[in-house]
Image (tube, rainbow, N blue to C red):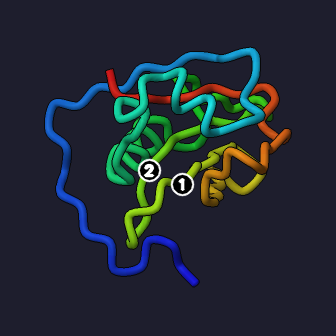
Amino acid sequence: MDLFEGKLESPFPGSTLKYSSPLDCSNEQSVVNDRGGAKAEVTLYEVIAVLQGQKDGVLGPLLTDGGINVFFTRDSINELLTVSVYYGAGGWVLNAFPISGDRPRRDHYPCRVFVRN
């Protein structure tokens, strides 16, 4: 099932994202809380805009050296998801999964977290 099927978003004009590299990205809910709750959420449109700005893995704010770039966005039923983005041999790879404070993930090392400024 496509988590974003049927989701409609408008461009978010004038948005800017900031990023940091926290020491621990293993528990997404803690990362969201530490980054200001609602300010941690970005739109899928914003995620795609960042990717388009760094096509072909050129240098920029996104990690391209095996690290994971982390965004938090809502799916089509308004559930908060972690969107992990990394650059592989074939280009950008996106994975999305529900946040669960009870199920920490330990696969985000090193990581860079993007939130709304």
2 or 30: nearer the eye? 30
Q: Residue at x 66, y 51 (%)?
A: 100
Q: Position of residue 74 (x, y in %)?
A: 41, 57
Disc 2 + disc 1, Cβ < 8 Å: yes
Pointer 2 or 1: first along the chain = 2
Amino acid under disc 1: Leu
Q: Residue at x 72, y 36 (%)?
A: 27
| Residue positioned most to the front | 102
Read off the residue under disc 1.
81
Residue located 47% across and 43% down the image: 51
Q: Secondary structure at mark 1?
A: strand
Residue 63 position by quadrant: top right
Asked whether, in this view, residue 32 is left or right of residue 68, the answer is left
Q: Quadrant of the N terminus?
A: bottom right
| 92 relative to 114, above or below | below
Q: Quadrant of residue 106?
A: top right
Q: Is residue 16 above or below residue 54?
A: above
Q: Residues within 10 Å of mark 2 (few under 14, many from 20)?
A: many
Q: Position of residue 3 (x, y in %)?
A: 51, 73
Circle on res. 72: none
Seen in the picture, residue 44 relative to 14 is either above or below; the reply is below
Relative depth, front residue between 13 and 73: 73
Q: How many angstroms separate mark 2 from mark 1 (CA)?
A: 5 Å
Element class at badge 2: strand
Residue placed furthest toward the bottom: 1
> Can you identify the residue that label 2 sits on?
73
